Amino acid sequence: QLMKGLQDQQGELAKTQQQLSSGKKIIRSSDNPIATSAILSLNQSITMMDKYQTNIDFLDSRLSLEETVLSQEFEVLTQIKELVIRANSGSMGMNDKESTAQTIQDYVKNMAELANTKDSSGEFLFSGYKAETKPFVEVNGNFNYLGDSGTRFLQTGLSSKIQSSDSGDIFSISDKNTG
């Protein structure tokens, strides 16, 4: 009995030393099945929280870039508006109007370049679901939209999603009288 008691104590000592060296109270799942289950559940929760945080960081970066691009687009539109008003005022000669028209065409190309901006992962901001497709392509002086009207979302919490992309539809101009 003494030998069995010593062996049991030696086993307990080895277990305690293993716990101390690993920094973990539970070495094997059989040490405490209930606590092991709780630990696994917590580890899964931590993994999900890390994924949510990664998504939030990505969204912050992407949406900041999108905001910058849209702000630049607005500035270019304002410049075009000023040129059109000046050209329609009647104070410009034909050469000035032709020069203004060329400037406006350059501004439109600049807007298309802005609308074709890529994010840090190389995806186009305004292609909808077609993130790898360049959204605006010039064909014979006109710009065609090659993306789609889809919008993607990223999971940012257990029950929350945030829109992570826009389609090029945000650049479409429609006549309010025709719908």
Image (cartoon, rainbow, N blue to C red):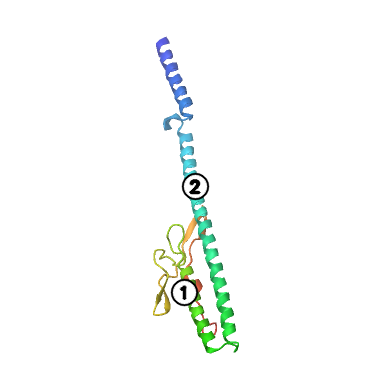
Residue 75 in sight = yes
Q: CA gap, disc 2 to disc 1?
A: 41 Å
Decide: marks 2, 1 in contact (CB < 8 A)? no
Q: Earlier in the sequence, mark 2 or mark 1?
A: 2
Mark 2 neighbour density, 10 Å: few (under 14) some (14–19) many (20 or more): few
State the image coordinates of residue 9 (x, y, percent, origin top left).
Answer: 45, 16
Seen from the viewer's position, the closer of residues 177 and 110 is 110
Left or right, 59 with reference to 3: right
Q: Identify the image quadrant of the N terminus.
A: top left
State the image coordinates of residue 93 (x, y, percent, origin top left).
Answer: 55, 89
**Label at residue 85:** none
Seen in the picture, residue 134 relative to 121 is either above or below; the reply is: below
Seen from the viewer's position, the closer of residues 144 and 140 is 140
Q: Secondary structure at mark 1?
A: helix
> Which residue is at a point 42% across and 19% down the rendered structure image?
11
Q: How many marks?
A: 2
State the image coordinates of residue 130 (x, y, percent, origin top left).
Answer: 40, 66
Mark 1 neighbour density, 10 Å: few (under 14) some (14–19) many (20 or more): some
Q: Secondary structure at mark 2?
A: helix
Q: Which residue is mark 2?
A: 50
> Which residue is at a point 57% across and 85% down the rendered structure image?
87
> Which residue is at a point 49% across and 47% down the rendered structure image?
50
**Label at residue 109:** 1
Return the residue found at the far top: 2
State the image coordinates of residue 89 (x, y, percent, origin top left).
Answer: 60, 87
Seen in the picture, residue 92 relative to 11 is either above or below; the reply is: below
> Which residue is at a point 47% across and 23% down the rendered structure image?
16
Q: Amino acid at mark 2?
A: Asp
Q: Nearer the viewer, mark 2 or mark 1?
A: 1
Q: Amino acid at mark 1?
A: Lys
Residue 179 in sight = no
Seen from the viewer's position, the closer of residues 86 and 70 is 86
